[in-house]
Image (cartoon, rainbow, N blue to C red):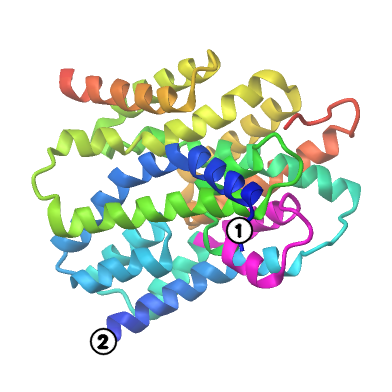
Amino acid sequence: MNLIYLVLAMAAVTYIPRMVPLVILKNVRLPRYLNRFMTFIPYAALGALIFPGVITSTGSGHMGAGIIGCLTAILLAWLETNLIFVIAGGILGAFLVSVLF
Amino acid sequence: MMTVSNRVDFFQGLKVGLPIGIGYIPIAVAFGLLAKSLAIPNIVGVLMSLVIYAGASQFIGVNLLVVGASFGDIVITTLLLNLRHFLMSATLSQRVETNISKPWRALLAFGVTDETFAVSVLQKQDKLSRYFVLGLNAIAFAAWNFGTWLGIFFATGVPEIIKTSMGIALYAMFIGLLIPHVKKSKPVLVVAMLAVIINMLMYWSAAVLGVSNGFSIIVATIVSAAVGAGLYEAGEGEVER
């Protein structure tokens, strides 16, 4: 029963940061600098989310798999193949390294 | 209630969200397996995915539970891990259509994750339809919960090597989302590289600085986006969407 309260508290602190800006920043016109700041946020966030997380994503003992999977995905993304193939290529690259080494 | 064009938007959202769903399933299965192996009651594992719906927080939450961390510590860690969504929701709030009611915004907010955020805001259209975002969020949420159930109730014999290889799926998706923009726009390249460098420096000095992973992502994102906004005036370095 206590665990249920913990889960609900975790749910609250997860939901509040997601909800407040979307509900509050309704129809706000931001200054131009902030607008440019906002347009850069996705790219900055993606960069920070990818590195260094991707390297240890296949387990800290399999960093080679993470690195090769990452390079495969970068190559396929550079060639602008469909997102599904980028994901499949990343998994396949990591898988082959895990199997072979 | 739902007009034809709303339905089209919703299905478009489902379609665009499909890669997220595919990426979520193995991770959610791993979460279900972990919760089960740590003797977390099934109902708690299922409930976590339903109401918390945040991958890293759920993994860390069950781990902290098992090592006997206090409830207060777990809740604070969860909050720190998810503060980055504040930034993402603020960005998304400028991209959804303007005439959406507060309850609708509150509903769409529940579906904000790193992945649904990145996919929605990188769409080409200037204003996103609420039904499009709803569809995108719905397929990701459904996949996350489906995977959790699979992990808790069915998947016992998945080979370790397959599970670990699938761990890269969402990162590969992030790469697939980012690289085409990096190729086309130098400001985007500079900002993304700066974020990578700041985050890696903070990650590797985490022991010294005592910062969590979630916090270093927030700092790296804010600093590099701020530098980018200062360096590139609109016009000469117009960011391409």
> What amino acid does circle 2 point to?
Met
Task: Give, as a single range, the part of the protein colored magenta.
Answer: B82-108
Q: Is residue B90 magenta?
A: yes
Name the residue: 30% across, 51% down.
Answer: B28
Task: For label 2, count other residues whose C-alpha is less than 10 Å away and answer few (under 14), some (14-19) or many (20+).
Answer: few
Which residue is at the far left? B157
- Secondary structure type for disc 2: loop
Q: Quadrant of residue B12?
A: top right
Q: Residue B226: x percent and y percent?
A: 76, 44
Q: Where's the C terminus of chain A, which quadrant? A: top left
Number of the front mark, 1 or 2: 1
Classified by dominant secondary structure, the portion drawn in magenta counts as helix
- Secondary structure type for disc 1: loop
Q: Quadrant of residue A100?
A: top left
**How far separated are the C-alphas under marks 1 and 2?**
39 Å
- Please check whether the numbered discs 1 and 2 fall on a single chain: no
Q: Which residue is mark 2?
A: A1
- Residue B2 is labelled as 1
In this view of the protein, which residue sits in the foreground, B216 or B33?
B33
Q: Residue B221: x percent and y percent?
A: 64, 46
> What amino acid does circle 1 point to?
Met
Q: Quadrant of residue B112?
A: bottom right
